[in-house]
Image (cartoon, rainbow, N blue to C red):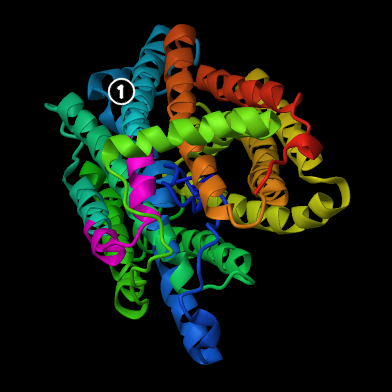
Amino acid sequence: MDTGAPEGSPTPSVPGRDPWVQAPTPSPPPVPPVVPSHGVAELPPKERRRRVVSWALWDWGSAAFNAVATTFVFSVWLTSSAFVSPSIVSAADGAAEDSEPAKALADVIAQHSSWLGYGLSIAAVIVALLAPALGSQADSAGRRKLWLGVHSGFVTLALAAMFLVVPDPNRLTPYFLGGVALLAVGTVFFELAAVNYNALLGSVSTRDNVGKVSGFGWGMGYLGGIVLLFVLLVGFIGLGDADGMLGLTGDAGLKYRAAMLFSALWFGVFALPVLLKVPEPAASRGERRRLGFLDSYRKLAHDIAELWRESRDTLKFLIASAVFRDGLTGVFTFGGIIAAGTFGFSGSDVIIFAIVANVVAGVATISSGWFDDRFGPKAVIVVSLIGLLIAGTAIFVLHAGGARVFWTFGLVLTIFVGPAQTASRTLLARVIPPGREAEVFGLYATTGRAAIFLAPSAFAVTIALGGAQYWGIVGIMLVLGLGLALLLPVRPERATWSS
């Protein structure tokens, strides 16, 4: 993100702009496929800027799903006491934390958090299964804008339908599961939209500035998340017990449901400029032929076999990065849920934390470029993952310390997410032979999608085993730790192969 959204993620957040498919997360740094410039270099500067801004506004609007729906607003409300039986909630009100009524409430919230994790895992598996076929479509000449529009439309509908999720005391479980289903469906269509969005990057950039343009889009996602969350906080949700400027109350979750309607409008409006102002690249003989669904998997197997023969360290890195990038996505995806369910954050508290976290993550990520150039990308990734493990472990061990613990170590977590994502991209970019950029970044995206079920599944399973929501932190830390263990043996200087 949009923290929404770290892998790719959805980035708080965020976020990534992989050419095959995008991760469901609040907003990780985009991975730029290097593609032909389609005559962009010959355009007047004003027209080039207009195209870039039109393209990046989709990223700006994507905060509606990455930051608001999956990370900081809808998912947090969905897993709150609003969807717990009023009798359980009233019995726990004012009771001691270790009392039976309080434990009963915590058990239901933990169960709901686990169910949400399973729902997002199913969506992740669907995306992972479709990734090779989607990648072949994005890398060939086709109706990219048409499918970008169609898939964006379904995301908009999913966001708008979240208004219909009501905490009806007589039908709490059906409405809760309906909300989980909408998040899962929206995630799948968001990933499909992102494939075609990424494929249009060549229509707004050249080989010389594709990284800057891609980074600009990622930055717009962060900025869009900050602006949208601020608007929702002030206008709809309000600070503390006070209502927002529109006077919407929390009765039947109205202020949260209305926020989702506004978010649907936000995404729909900002998805239009790329459809109206960015031209569709024409087919050319130089573009890869369109592959069938099964052919996409055959090509994936061929690419992996080739890497095994020519550059095993590159293949090892792709596997390691797929694991730790999913852990990074999990940090943002479930961070808001844990803040509310375990540390007692109100809806407005979560949004305030999200805004601050977006700012911290953006500054840290931009600053990490100097360390990348000075010490190398692997060093940045290793230090970032260690920092994440330390901060995450502190949150788990000190969870009884309340909101102050989460504010302190939660912001430490956000410092390290962006640098790990960007350094992962630059490490791969440093070893790709000329002329194979799109192919290798496509494989980078595909391997990443193949692992996106890990964090949601680990989050859900550890909660089920531990019996409390904060055990989900252990699941995410296990995924990050596994990624770090797989990364340590990788030797970047050997991750090269013939062109």
Position of 50 relative to 440 (above/below): below
Percent from the top left, x then y, of residue 486?
67, 23
Q: Residue at x 64, y 71 (%)?
A: 208
Q: Residue at x 19, y 27 (%)?
A: 172
Q: Residue at x 24, y 22 (%)?
A: 85
- Hey, what amino acid is under mark 1? Ser
One can see residue 340 in this view: no
Percent from the top left, x then y, of residue 83?
27, 29
Residue 245 among those drawn in magenta: no
Q: Is residue 126 left or right of residue 224?
A: left
- Which of 368/298 is in front? 298
- Which of 382/2 is in front? 382
* Extent of the magenta region: 130-150
- Which of 458/371 is in front? 371
Name, please, the residue furthest toward the left: 170
Percent from the top left, x then y, of residue 137?
33, 52
User: Tag 1, which secondary structure?
Assistant: helix
Circle 1 crowding by C-alpha within 10 Å: few under 14, some 14–19, many from 20: few
Percent from the top left, x then y, of residue 74?
34, 43
Which residue bears the numbered disc 1?
90
One can see residue 216 in this view: yes
Residue 140 among those drawn in magenta: yes
